[in-house]
Amino acid sequence: MKPLKAYENVLNLCINMSSKQQVVDSYPIYANIDPTTYCNLSCPACTTGLKLNLRPVQTMKFDHYKAIIDEIGDYLFQVLLYNWGEPLLHKQAPEFIRYAKEKEINVQISTNFSIKFSDDYLERLVKSGLNLILIALDGATPETYSKYRRGGDFNLVRENMLRLRIIRDKLGYKTPTIAWKFVVFRHNEHEVQKAIDEHKDWGADTMVFDAAVMPSDPYNDGIEPSTMPEFNTYVSERRRKAIAENLAKTSGCSRLWGVTAFGPTGRVYPCCWVSEEEDDFGQYSESEGFLSAWNSPRYQQARRSFANRTKGSTIKSEDEFMKILHATDGSGMGKAGAVKKDGLVCNRCPVPEEWNHVEELIKLMIPDMSPGKEKDLLLRALQVLHEGELSFKDQIA
């Protein structure tokens, strides 16, 4: 279990968020950390795959990563060790994972897995303590897979997935959970059932299906969203309902108080959708500490932008809704995206249905917890979000 101060931080975070503090003394509980911004594939809806150079190709040094985990790791409950690059191209990725696990952090990786791994590397990956590995395999045949995962080797991914499970089981480990991640498009939806039927034979423990984000013009030739409504974020009624339900629960984007993202050199940005370095919010340095970047002018401006927003806010016009509906095209908010740049990156958020992210994370922690002070702190944190409280000191007293 995490130290008590991690749970006290959750409560403090929720008080800061509920009172819309612009300068905060609480830490995020969830982070994306990018080991590298290089990828070996050329997926057409990804700014990295398109080689648009919105972020320089860089690799994180272990000492820099260690400094981040040393400072905020006690407060982090989950780290996604990926974002704009292929994480397993980093030779020390298993060691990155192991170091985070020493802080009792749930660590997940998403990978194209189209890499020639040695047995030693896969053994290190298993022994690292990795909780979940999402393996991108968008199809059950080479022809279907290659339509979007351009440059990937279908047979190599299949081989690696099975090898990983064999190595894991031989070593006697229960983790990582191996998830076949299938992004559903129109061109591969007919293979969904085949994947469900055969995934265990291929080496996966489970299936994860995602609705596809579309490439933006001129990169969208031949790529269409699924005709299956459950895998199509462009079905307006379904998306409108999800956004409305989320806006009813929150008066601002909780990520600005509880979630952050790091690039390989310590660039700090508010969420995983920020594809362009010039939109970043700050720079982490060990000497200045994380709170300096966490309370940068851009972070304060973004938090301030929600000052007058109330729960139950609605989308004001059909034009605004359609702008949101296609804001994820081309990976969201960068130059490849569908949304014209206008001021602070948060002003063109492509996923307002995810503003309630922190509350959902807290809810996921509670069911498996035994009664005690830690669980009480999380329950009080949820109460704060719904009812509001004056101060952290009053709550802890």
Image (cartoon, rainbow, N blue to C red):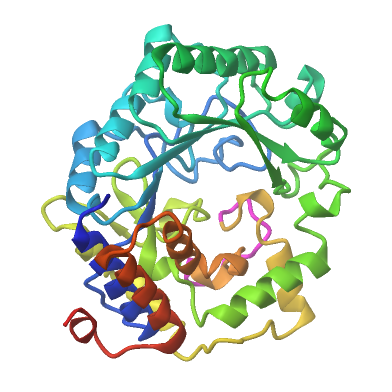
Residue 322: quadrant of the picture: bottom right
The image position of residue 33, as x and y in percent, is 37, 44
- The residue depicted at 28 percent of the width and 44 percent of the height is 104
- The residue depicted at 32 percent of the width and 71 percent of the height is 376
Q: How many marks?
A: 0
Position of residue 225 in the picture relative to residue 385 (left or right)? right
The span picked out in magenta is: 334-345
- The residue depicted at 38 percent of the width and 49 percent of the height is 78
Is 298 located above or below residue 306 in the figure? above
Magenta span contains residue 248: no
Pick the quarter of the image with the C terminus. bottom left
The image position of residue 396, as x and y in percent, is 20, 79
Residue 15: quadrant of the picture: bottom left
Residue 103: quadrant of the picture: top left
- Asked whether residue 60 appears in the rendered view, the answer is yes
Q: Residue furthest front?
A: 371
* Secondary structure character of the magenta stretch overall: loop
